Amino acid sequence: MKKLSILITGILVTLGLAGCGNAGTETATQAPAAEPTAAEETQADNTGSGGNTLVVYFSATGNTESVANYIAEATDADIFELEPVEPYTEDDLDWTDDNSRVTYEHDNPDERNVELVADTVDNWDSYDTVFIGYPIWWGIAAWPVDGFVEANDFTGKTVIPFCTSSSSDIGDSGTLLEEAAGTGEWIEGMRFRGSSSESDVAEWIAGLDI
């Protein structure tokens, strides 16, 4: 009788321990993963391996924007669009019209001081390399870019201009921007057709010593 009592007690103890083990396993398996805090989500969104490169661009018709996005993708860069407070309409951009906005601004250089929604970038000092993109207007960089170049200190930065045009080359546009900036190490830029592909841009990026 005593042996039977001991045997039953042992079985009950064993079952109890097994039950506790199963409960612990279930709890660990079913517990939801901790969700990131808002601060952690923000940090994740703003962190990238190419955080020291910035692509700045003004795009009138979307061609420069496409190239800028290709560059940002190839270099894992941040991107910043220059937006005039008074956007250019299709009629404004008709350079064949003697009365259009761009023609008027071209003929009257004092009117080329285009106000931008923003001409400075957060964390500017953290960027080592800055690409600056623009369409070519009358052989020079589209003047909405001028305000950004003049408003920032490029000291210690490598600056790489790029442009889009249907026929004109990059010409002296990069050199003129460098003179306006007065700071930074500017290197020879590149002109792209409006139809340039992502592979065209990637090939150029691969050849840069940056």
Image (spheres, rainbow, N blue to C red):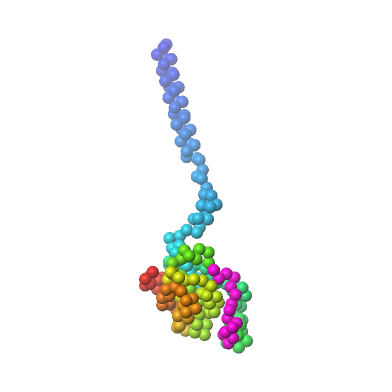
Q: Is residue 72 left or right of residue 83?
A: left
Residue 31 percent across, percent down from the top left: 50, 40
Residue 100 visible in rendering = yes
- The segment highlighted magenta reads 106-120
Q: Residue furthest top?
A: 1
Q: Is residue 178 magenta?
A: no
Q: Is residue 119 magenta?
A: yes
Q: In which quadrant will I find the C terminus? A: bottom left
Residue 107 percent across, percent down from the top left: 58, 87
Residue 101 percent across, percent down from the top left: 61, 82
Who is closer to the viewer here, 36 or 32? 36
Q: Is residue 92 left or right of residue 34?
A: right
Q: Look at the magenta stretch and give its main secondary structure.
A: loop
Residue 125 percent across, percent down from the top left: 48, 65
Write the residue at 55% across / 75% down.
147
Q: Residue furthest bottom?
A: 98
* 37 vs 151: above or below: above
